[in-house]
Image (tube, helix red, strand yellow):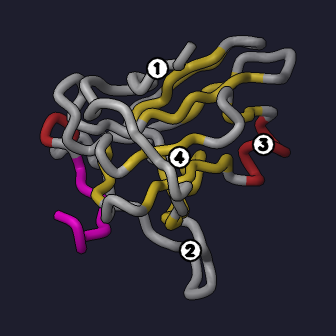
Amino acid sequence: MSAIRRFEVLPEFRDAGVVLPQRATAASAGYDLACAEAVAILPGAVALVPTGLRAWMPPEEFLAIHIRSSVGTRRGLALANGTGVIDSDYAGNPDNGGHILIALRNLGPEPVSLQRGERIAQGVFLRYLLTSDDAPGAARAGGFGSSGARA
């Protein structure tokens, strides 16, 4: 799949009304990502919001996940990890089939309810560079957050 860049609805979400992400305008960099299920996030809490999607991309790319500005300013939500990074080998992992989950933290004093289909983030496909002495570790063996920390 090295030349393919696309989103795909996961099999378990095909009957849930999940739609493929679209760019809002011809000049938009990001593809809008929406909730696949309704989610409530308590004040100070973090929730992994399902999108029902996976993304395929060439090995030299990643999908950067950013909060939609209206979700941050009007709803008081932020990405718990600052910026999400979906690696090209995430789509085929055995743990969750590459399900893109959006980690949101509620910074406000009240619970926030997100509805199914509500656009919460945007994904931007980007290329990255490697150092001349790059020596990557083993192949991916799991899902969300599975690449782990090195000592």
Give the left or right position of residue 29, taking residue 90 as reference: right
**Residue of label 3:** 72
Residue at mark 2 = 24
Q: Quick check: marks 1 and 3 in contact, CB under 8 Å?
A: no
Q: CA distance from mark 1 to mark 3?
A: 28 Å
Secondary structure at numbered mark 3: helix
Nearer the observer, 110 or 54: 54
Badge 2 density bin: few <14, some 14–19, many ≥20, Cα 10 Å? few
Question: What's the residue type where badge 3 is placed?
Answer: Gly
Amino acid type indicated by mark 4: Glu
Q: Is label 4 in a helix, a strand or a loop?
A: loop
Q: Is residue 150 left or right of residue 69?
A: left
Residue shown at 63%/29% (left/top)? Answer: 104
How far apart marks 3 and 4 lie (CA) works out to 13 Å
Mark 4 or 2: the one toward you: 2
Q: Nearer the viewer, residue 71 or 64?
A: 64
Q: Secondary structure at mark 2?
A: loop
- Residue at 67%, 27% (x, y): give it: 80
Nearer-N-terminus badge (1/4): 4
Q: Examine the structure image and report whether residue 6 is included in the region drawn in magenta.
A: yes
Q: Which mark sits nearer the N-terminus, 2 or 3?
A: 2
Labelled disc at residue 148: 1
Image: magenta residue range: 1-9
Query: CB of mark 3 within 8 Å of CB of mark 4?
Result: no
Sooner in the amino-acid sequence: mark 3 or mark 4? 3
Q: Is residue 86 left or right of residue 120?
A: left
Residue 138 is drawn in which quadrant? Answer: top left
Residue 101: percent from the left, percent from the top? Answer: 44, 33
- State which mark lies toward you, 1 or 4: 1
- What amino acid is found at the position of numbered circle 2 in the picture? Ala
